[in-house]
């Protein structure tokens, strides 16, 4: 390992030799990319490819020759090592064999010649010094291939038809492949040359190859995502109409959130943090500009439209987006709220008033939800007016507090802190939105909350089939939501319960080992087998037809091992000190589990559930067998409104049923399959749109899972 | 921060309560807008499933039915154009003939319909097992189930259209001059005996023969009509489940030949038809494919089980009417039923209210 | 073996002793809960109308127990949940085998015997799974040729070569690759890869080779994650010792890390194989579904036939419960389960061996 290892203790920077080696590495990378580009059709295969290869071969040979005879100080081993011998031997055997038997038409004789030539080259490689042995055979091979291509022996119109394969391999495929192989070989040799051969050099070569492999994998991933996005985005955004008021609200919310979670201080950060903070700054600026543009559009009553997306200059806000934004703001305010315990009577009264007001608003809205109609006195709706008053008062107080804080004045003690008044204002806004959602009536006029119609997104909100409408994926999305929800409700309690038992109660025994084996077996079972199981076991017992309920159970079974494994790990990683401390306080075992172990392991369990949901949301195979809905459904399943409870004299005396659960339905991945089954043809763009939506949903879950894992891990390490 | 390690705060709203409240609110909001139960009715929806050949007809009928357009919608309904005197919506009218109450609402029919797509075998099995109300098949139930099947007496055969099953080839083959083929050549292609287009006067390319799944009506009819035996073993290069997939394959490849339904033929597009010469007669698309003697022509069936009930009759009545034949059969390139056959089929329906 | 047996007998004895220590109501509640849930399960399996009654009874007993004897009820309920998890695998196996029996009785060993007729024709009652098994084999080989070297290289990169900041990017990216649904891969394969490969090589679309490539990419993240875990488990002390001797990073990897983690890496490759075998949707939409052995040569990976998984997925709409075709699908499912479970067990054993070696070596 340490023979002929003359280490330069002082590295005086790159010599010309090293620079030329780098040059050859870059050149081979370029050749490799050229080959890939030719495969993708971005560049047409031509004879100059051969020239590139020839140049590479010559350059590689020069590197070796200069090292051996040119007086450059390198540190090669005495022999080239086994792996180089094997590679070269195999390469030359294959090449000679192909050339001899096909081009020279020697047939089997050609292969016999190859069997001699290959090992001969291998032996030569073995016997020469490493610098020659690594570069010369490679240079000869690459150069030879280059000459073959340049002289047109293998030209873009060349074909090879091996009888065994019933395929025609054209020059258009062979030349790029040869370019890639040649680029790889030359790159590896020159990378080895860069560090002067020897162990350092070989390390370089190996690292180059490995990094290239990883780069390839990641670029395939990136390419995939970009490709689906590019093909699907036009369909998904087609005819999207959004009210400017709603858009403004969403942009403002995004702005606030990004300011909060980011550290916008590029000057103070360093390294990757610097890049991160610059990115954050850019995001914030863009959002700010967008918000300004939207506000201007509202003021000027000007419709913004581009392609098929329209932004209408309405100043009303949609109820659902408003609800969403309001909840986000509430969460932010709650996070940063400080406890307020007033000491004065006045303060306490104010606090109680606030509580009563908020409570009253909530109860009224809840009543409206149950009753379904708007509560009104004398033609005037109670809830919005009440909420608006409360919200207005608290807004005024908040502004006053903010102003007082800015100008430095002190406030009377009975004034609640800013976060509280702000919270009440946002709360009132949320109540108004809920009112609009439950009763369908708008709040306010030109500036207010519209019950619906603020956002019209055909692709997401329309059914997949109907007279004269644009096709959408709503039934599929609703189907996916219900199926996933059902699976989670079924599998998570089961898995968490089993995890509790296995970590806390059970000791290592045959039983636990059997459960381990069963869990691993379940985890690696193919998804189609789960589908078959559903067909054989569940479907006959739930009405004999494929149904949503059966799909929920099947996906639940698939989710079970994932959540079980992550929950077990989460519970095992709860430090024993917690349990010991709890026992020391005299708490019983079950109480410890309930109030110490389970809450502490919740983050891990939640992460596992999110990641598992991400996985099952994309599963198609079991759905094919147990859900099997119409290809282009005309309506979404209405489950919440179909629950029925009856009492009857036959067993089991109390029937709880939901017929909607026993119907077939569609789900997002199933919808994509249906597009393919229905013959892609006219529906191809719809298919790409569905693929994009599916990808977004799955990746959103995945991103949430990774983010939560990172968040909880960082909290644990604090 | 107000939260301690376990998500509960000293005072104020704890994280867990907040999440619970949000979840409850979210569910209520979702209930408000997601739950779209069938407002329509106590009547179960009419379900149909089966052949991909019949699918274009039943699917068009189904989407028009569920849309329930008003009478003044000349594009989709306009009863005056067909000599029908009514101002009811489409589904209201056709269902009203059998006693169903009109809803007078667009997109809300008296009962909804759902048409699924698989193939004839599934359709026939489904209607026998009462999984669906109407089983679509592009081949007779006898040929699919076998002539001694016990349930054959319980199903009612409603013919809604006629398909002259043409042979199509890839665009490149058609343009290279192969515009007709004999019955013997076709038989040999699907048995794997003829493998190159050059043997038929075409370019030097392998013949890529596309077949259908073994118990699809199209495949059964093809084998029955060409080889005389619906169970004749043939060896196509690939088998696809539906006509739609076959059309895609013919389009994607430049050496394909396939048997397909009329609705999927594009004479100037990706699936041009070629003539078939059988027993001395040349059958060509647009000329005589509809002739009774064309051996490959077949009836398109909608089977019902145990008679025909009111919903099924209402739906089928619409398809069999002049309105239905003009709007569902003709645009899909199939042959309308001649009037005598239509009368015969109408007599199989239930009595009108 | 005897150790396990004595362990089990000791456990049962302690269990019985604990049971006898309980007071009457607790004993009653526990037995009630256990019996009621067994009743529910049995009723469900035989499709009796009393199932829901048993379920209500169980819920009642559990509620009463929760209010009165919470700790005990919690223990019993969580034990039942664990038993449920354990029984799921058993249920799957049992019901699959039950449904597969008719075709096994009809075709016998012909189902998998490669030297028989190897014909699949549902209309003529011939059900040989050999073409499907061969198709699975070919695609899996191509997939592993891609997934194994790429996967091990990726694992080496992540655990040894990459600097910290790069690792933070590459690891989630690999998990992202695993998260892409297989139907999306299938859609891309159907619309882009099939026509492209078909045109380039003048073959019929759906080449097993192209399918193997796609499946290989899907199995890649599995191999990378498990192999990376194995490589990270190599103790730092071994690597440090090697570096102290003057070896380079690469030499350490080659001669210390990889041989030590070899069992883990082989376990990773085996899991990747299992994943590749079980992959359904991408293959189903790309393959041609002509159920015969490849022509003209058996090893012609450019032909397109059928695999075990695609057979099941493509035939679901064509079969009615009870007929032989239906049963044959379940036979294919049983075969799949056996192969994948076998692979899983082998990789478990291999991994256990590695853990023992590492622990014993310290």
Image: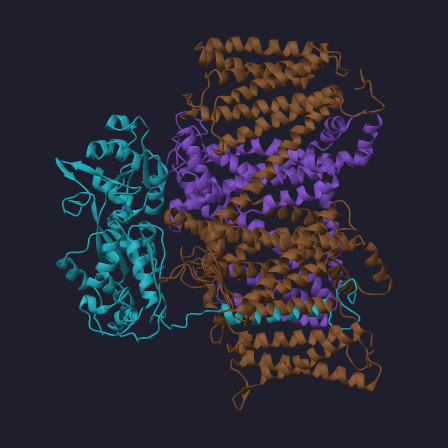
Image point (67%, 55%), residue name:
A607
Residue C264 in the image: above or below residue C172: above
Can you tell which chain is drawn brown?
A: A
Q: Quadrant of residue C327?
A: top left
Image point (62%, 67%), residue name:
A325
At which x and y percent is residue A141? 57, 16
Quarter placement of the N terminus of chain A: top right
At which x and y percent is residue A128? 69, 10
Residue furthest to the bottom in view is A378
Quarter placement of the C terminus of chain A: bottom right
Can you tell which chain is drawn cyan?
A: B
Image point (14%, 59%), residue name:
B339
Residue A279 in the image: above or below residue C331: below
Q: How many marks?
A: 0
Residue furthest to the front in view is A300
* Residue closest to the eye, B191 or A678: A678
Q: Quadrant of residue B159?
A: bottom left
At which x and y percent is residue A143? 57, 16
* Residue closest to the eye, C125 or A130: A130
Look at the image and give the colour of chain C. Answer: purple
Q: Quadrant of residue A521?
A: top right
* Residue closest to the eye, B50 or A306: A306
Query: Going by the image, does B163 lie left or right of A381?
Result: left
Residue furthest to the right in view is A584
Q: Is residue C339 visible?
A: no
At which x and y percent is residue A336? 75, 67
Residue C282 in the image: above or below residue A195: below
* Residue closest to the eye, A393 or C259: A393
């Amino acid at each position: 390992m340490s023979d002929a290892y003359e280490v330069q203790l002082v590295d005086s920077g790159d010599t010309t030799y090293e620079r030329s080696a780098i040059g050859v590495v870059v050149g081979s990378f370029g050749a490799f990319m050229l080959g890939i580009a030719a495969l993708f059709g971005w560049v047409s295969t031509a004879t100059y490819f051969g020239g590139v290869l020839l140049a590479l071969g010559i350059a590689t040979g020069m590197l070796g020759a200069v090292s051996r005879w040119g007086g450059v100080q390198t540190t090669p081993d005495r022999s080239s090592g086994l792996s180089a011998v094997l590679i070269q031997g195999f390469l030359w055997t294959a090449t000679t064999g192909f050339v001899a038997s096909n081009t020279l038409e020697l047939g089997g004789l050609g292969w016999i010649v190859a069997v001699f030539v290959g090992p001969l080259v291998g032996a030569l490689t073995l016997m020469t010094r490493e610098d020659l042995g690594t570069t010369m055979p490679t240079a000869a091979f690459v150069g030879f291939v280059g000459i073959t291509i340049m002289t047109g022996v293998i030209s873009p119109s060349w074909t090879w038809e091996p009888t065994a394969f019933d395929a025609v391999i054209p020059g258009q495929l062979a030349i790029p492949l040869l370019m890639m192989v040649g680029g790889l070989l030359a790159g590896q040799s020159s990378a080895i040359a860069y560090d002067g051969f020897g162990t350092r050099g070989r390390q370089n070569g190996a690292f180059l190859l490995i990094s290239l492999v990883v780069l390839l994998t990641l670029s395939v991933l990136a390419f995939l995502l970009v490709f689906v996005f590019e093909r699907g985005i036009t369909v998904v955004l087609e005819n999207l109409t959004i009210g400017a008021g709603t858009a403004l609200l969403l942009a403002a919310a995004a702005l606030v959130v990004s300011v909060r979670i980011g550290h916008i201080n590029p000057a103070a950060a360093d390294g990757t943090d610097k890049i991160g903070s610059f990115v954050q700054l850019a995001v914030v600026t863009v959002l700010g500009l967008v918000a300004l543009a939207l506000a201007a559009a509202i003021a000027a009553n000007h419709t913004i439209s581009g392609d098929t997306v329209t932004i209408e200059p309405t100043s009303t806000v949609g109820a659902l987006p408003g609800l969403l934004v309001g909840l986000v703001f509430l969460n932010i305010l709650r996070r940063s709220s400080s406890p307020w315990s007033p000491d004065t009577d006045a303060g306490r009264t104010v606090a109680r008033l606030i509580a009563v007001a908020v409570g009253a608003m909530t109860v009224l809205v809840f009543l409206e939800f149950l009753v379904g109609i708007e509560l009104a006195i004398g033609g005037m709706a109670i809830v919005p007016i009440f909420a608006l008053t409360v919200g207005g008062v608290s807004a005024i107080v908040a502004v006053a507090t903010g102003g007082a804080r800015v100008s430095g004045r002190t406030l009377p003690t009975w004034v609640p802190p800013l976060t509280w008044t702000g919270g009440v204002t946002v709360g009132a806004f949320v109540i108004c939105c809920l009112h609009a959602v439950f009763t369908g009536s708008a709040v306010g006029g030109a500036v207010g909350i519209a019950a619906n119609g603020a956002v019209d997104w055909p692709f997401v909100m329309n059914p997949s089939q109907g007279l004269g409408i644009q096709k959408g994926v709503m039934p599929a999305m609703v189907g996916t939501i219900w199926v996933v929800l059902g699976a989670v409700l079924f599998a998570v309690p089961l898995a968490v319960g089993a995890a509790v038992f296995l970590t806390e109660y059970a000791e290592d025994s045959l039983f636990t080992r059997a459960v381990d084996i069963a869990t691993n077996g379940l985890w690696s079972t193919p998804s189609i087998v789960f589908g078959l199981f559903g067909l054989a076991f569940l479907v006959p017992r739930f009405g004999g037809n494929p149904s949503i309920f059966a799909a929920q159970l099947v996906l639940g079974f698939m989710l079970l091992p994932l959540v079980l494994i992550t929950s077990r790990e989460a519970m095992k990683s709860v430090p024993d000190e917690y349990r010991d401390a709890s026992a020391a306080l005299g708490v019983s075992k079950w109480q410890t589990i309930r109030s110490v172990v389970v809450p502490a392991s919740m983050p891990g369990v939640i992460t596992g559930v999110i990641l598992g949901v991400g996985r099952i949301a994309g599963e198609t195979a079991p759905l094919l067998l147990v859900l099997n809905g119409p290809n282009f459904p005309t309506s979404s399943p209405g489950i919440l409104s179909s629950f029925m409870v009856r009492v009857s004299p036959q067993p089991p005396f109390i029937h709880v049923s939901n017929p909607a659960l026993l119907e077939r339905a569609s789900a997002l991945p199933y919808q994509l399959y249906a597009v393919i089954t229905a013959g892609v043809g006219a529906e191809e763009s719809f298919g790409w749109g569905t693929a994009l939506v599916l990808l977004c949903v799955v990746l959103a879950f995945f991103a949430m899972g990774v983010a939560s894992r990172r968040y909880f891990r960082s909290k644990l390490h604090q | 921060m107000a939260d301690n390690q376990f998500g509960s705060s000293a005072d104020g709203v704890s994280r867990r309560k907040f999440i619970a409240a949000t979840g409850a609110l979210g569910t209520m909001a979702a209930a408000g807008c997601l739950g779209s139960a069938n407002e329509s009715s106590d009547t179960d929806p009419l379900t149909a499933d089966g052949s991909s050949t019949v699918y274009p007809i039943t699917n068009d009928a189904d989407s028009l039915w569920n849309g329930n357009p008003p009478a003044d919608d000349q594009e989709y309904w306009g009863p005056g154009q067909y000599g029908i005197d009514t101002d009811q919506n489409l589904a209201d009218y056709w269902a009203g003939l059998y006693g169903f109450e009109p809803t007078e609402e667009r997109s809300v029919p008296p009962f909804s319909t759902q048409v699924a797509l698989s193939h004839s075998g599934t359709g026939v099995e489904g209607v026998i097992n009462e999984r669906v109300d109407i089983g679509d098949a592009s081949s007779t139930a006898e040929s699919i189930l076998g002539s001694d099947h016990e349930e054959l007496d319980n199903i009612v055969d409603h013919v809604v259209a006629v398909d002259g099953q043409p042979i199509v080839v890839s665009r490149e083959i058609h343009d290279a001059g192969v515009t007709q083929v004999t019955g013997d050549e076709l038989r040999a292609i699907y048995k794997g005996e003829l493998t190159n287009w050059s043997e038929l006067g075409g370019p030097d390319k392998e013949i890529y023969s596309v077949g259908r799944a073994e118990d699809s009506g199209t495949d059964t009819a093809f084998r029955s009509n060409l080889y005389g035996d619906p169970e004749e073993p043939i060896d196509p290069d690939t088998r696809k489940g539906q006509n739609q997939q076959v059309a895609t394959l013919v389009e994607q490849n430049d050496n394909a030949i396939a048997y397909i339904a009329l609705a999927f033929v594009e004479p100037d597009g990706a699936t041009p038809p070629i003539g078939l010469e059988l027993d001395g007669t040349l059958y060509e698309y647009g000329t005589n494919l509809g002739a009774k003697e064309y051996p490959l022509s077949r009836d398109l069936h909608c089977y019902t089980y145990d008679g025909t009930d009111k919903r099924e009759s209402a739906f089928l009545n619409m398809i069999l009417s002049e309105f239905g034949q003009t709007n569902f059969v003709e645009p899909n390139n199939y042959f309308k039923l001649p009037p005598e056959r239509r009368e015969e089929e109408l007599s199989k329906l239930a009595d009108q209210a | 073996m005897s150790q396990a047996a004595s362990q089990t007998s000791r456990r049962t004895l302690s269990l019985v002793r604990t049971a006898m220590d309980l007071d009457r109501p607790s004993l009653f509640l526990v037995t009630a809960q256990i019996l009621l849930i067994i009743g529910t399960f049995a009723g469900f399996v035989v499709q009796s109308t009393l199932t829901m009654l048993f379920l209500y009874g169980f819920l009642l007993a559990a509620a009463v127990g929760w209010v009165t004897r919470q700790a005990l009820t919690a223990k019993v309920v969580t034990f039942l949940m664990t038993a449920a998890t354990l029984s799921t695998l058993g249920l799957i196996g049992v019901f699959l085998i039950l449904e597969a029996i008719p075709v096994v009785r009809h075709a016998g060993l012909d189902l998998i015997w490669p030297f028989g007729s190897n014909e699949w024709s549902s209309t003529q009652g011939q059900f040989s799974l050999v073409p499907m098994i061969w198709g699975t084999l070919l695609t899996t080989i191509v997939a592993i040729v891609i997934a194994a070297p790429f996967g091990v290289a990726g694992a080496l990169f992540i655990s040894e070569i990459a600097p910290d900041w790069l690792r933070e990017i590459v690891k989630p990216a690999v998990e992202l690759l695993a998260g892409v649904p297989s139907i999306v891969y299938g859609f891309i394969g159907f619309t882009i890869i099939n026509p492209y490969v078909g045109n380039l090589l003048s073959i019929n679309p759906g080449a097993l080779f192209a399918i193997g490539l796609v499946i290989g990419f899907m199995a890649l993240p599995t191999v990378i994650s498990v192999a990376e875990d194995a490589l990270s488990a190599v103790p730092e002390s071994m690597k440090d010792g090697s570096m102290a001797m003057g070896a380079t990073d690469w030499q350490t990897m080659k001669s210390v890390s990889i041989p030590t983690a070899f069992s883990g890496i082989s376990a990773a490759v085996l899991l990747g194989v299992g994943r590749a075998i079980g992959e359904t949707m991408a293959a189903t939409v790309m393959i041609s579904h002509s159920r015969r052995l490849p022509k003209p040569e058996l090893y012609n990976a450019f032909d397109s036939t059928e695999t075990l998984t695609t057979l099941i997925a493509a035939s679901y709409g064509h079969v009615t419960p009870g007929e032989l075709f239906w049963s044959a699908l379940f036979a294919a499912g049983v075969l799949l389960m056996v192969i994948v479970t076998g692979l899983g067990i082998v990789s478990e054993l291999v991994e256990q061996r590695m853990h023992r070696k590492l622990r014993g070596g310290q």
